[in-house]
Amino acid sequence: MSAGPGLVGSADGTPPATRSAAVKVMLFAALRRAAGVRETVVEGASGRTVAEVAAEVGERFGLRLGGVMCAVNERYVDPGYELAEGDVLALLPPVSGG
Amino acid sequence: MTDLAPLARTADGDILGVTPEPLTLEPLVAALRADAFGATACFIGTVRSPNRGRAVRFIEYEGYEAMIVRELVAIAGDLHRGHAIGRVAMVHRLARLAPGEASIAIVVASGHRRAALDACSEALELCKQRLPVWKYEVTDDGGAYVRGASVAGATL
């Protein structure tokens, strides 16, 4: 079984030789409520942009992402930011602190 | 919040953090006090009711805690660069809060009043723009997220 992109693990449970570069995506506020989960994982996200990965998550859960800001590893980033393995992407609806 | 233990003090002597506990100014004022600081400006933000004409039962505050702390450190850095201040405290409470309960406390100590007042005002504006915090407001008509701002980062 070749370790192609998108391969997560083998069926018999042995660790894959090449794990696809996964990125954890955190959802907050209205996005969290709409999705019904606080976080999800996107496989093969390394090298893709925040906008691309966010769109995949949006499609997965039927989310509307207009006005949403993005953070990677707890820092605001532009949608064009390129993700690397192990990054944590957060999708942040308009904020209303204070 | 009589105990400052969960709140880190930075190298600049600032106190920054998030807490689920009730906020009070006195411990923050005491923690920032120094003989050289002749001015201390304080701000407390509390849950307002009625809001937009509707009686508020409570607001559920939700936040991305690790990022809030990181942003608070960045905001404090901006305040130190932009104003002649000594120390700043910024603490956001995340919990279900009833009208009148405090959600944010800001204290700025400086040599003279103008810097403290200006920095305190700017601190609040920056917190509202940059902290990843959301308010779910519940009235007799149901609940909804309070309209927020998307100016801290580019949007999707």
Image (cartoon, coloured by chain):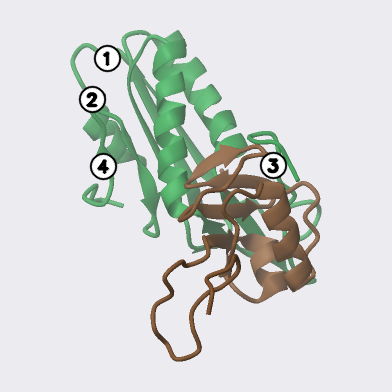
- Viewer-nearest of labels 1 and 4? 4
User: Label 4: which residue?
Assistant: B8
**Type of the residue with mark 2:** Arg
Task: Report helix, strand or loop for mark 1.
Answer: loop
Q: Are marks 3 and 1 in contact (CB under 8 Å)?
A: no
Residue drawn 66% across the image and 46% down it: A49
Figure check: A51 above or below B86:
below
Q: Are marks 1 and 2 in contact (CB under 8 Å)?
A: yes
User: Label 3: which residue?
Assistant: A79
**Type of the residue with mark 3:** Pro
Q: Nearer the viewer, residue B144 or A58?
A: A58
Q: Of the numbered discs in the image, which one, if any, rests on residue B37?
A: 1
- Residue B58 position, x and y percent, is 61, 64
Residue B144 seen in render: yes
Q: Would you say B30 lies left or right of B53 here?
A: left
State which chain disc 3 sits on.
Answer: A
- Residue A5 position, x and y percent, is 59, 65
- Viewer-nearest of labels 2 and 3? 3
Q: Nearer the viewer, residue B48 or A80?
A: A80
Spatial distance from mark 2 to mark 3, Cα to Cα? Answer: 43 Å
Spatial distance from mark 4 to mark 3, Cα to Cα? Answer: 32 Å
- For the residue carrying disc 3, how many other residues have a C-alpha within 10 Å: few (<14), some (14-19), or many (20+)? many
Task: Report helix, strand or loop for mark 4.
Answer: strand
State which chain disc 1 sits on.
Answer: B
Q: Are marks 4 and 2 in contact (CB under 8 Å)?
A: no
Which chain gets the green colouring? B
Which chain gets the brown colouring? A
- Viewer-nearest of labels 4 and 3? 3
User: Label 2: which residue?
Assistant: B33
Q: Earlier in the sequence, mark 4 or mark 2?
A: 4
State which chain disc 2 sits on.
Answer: B
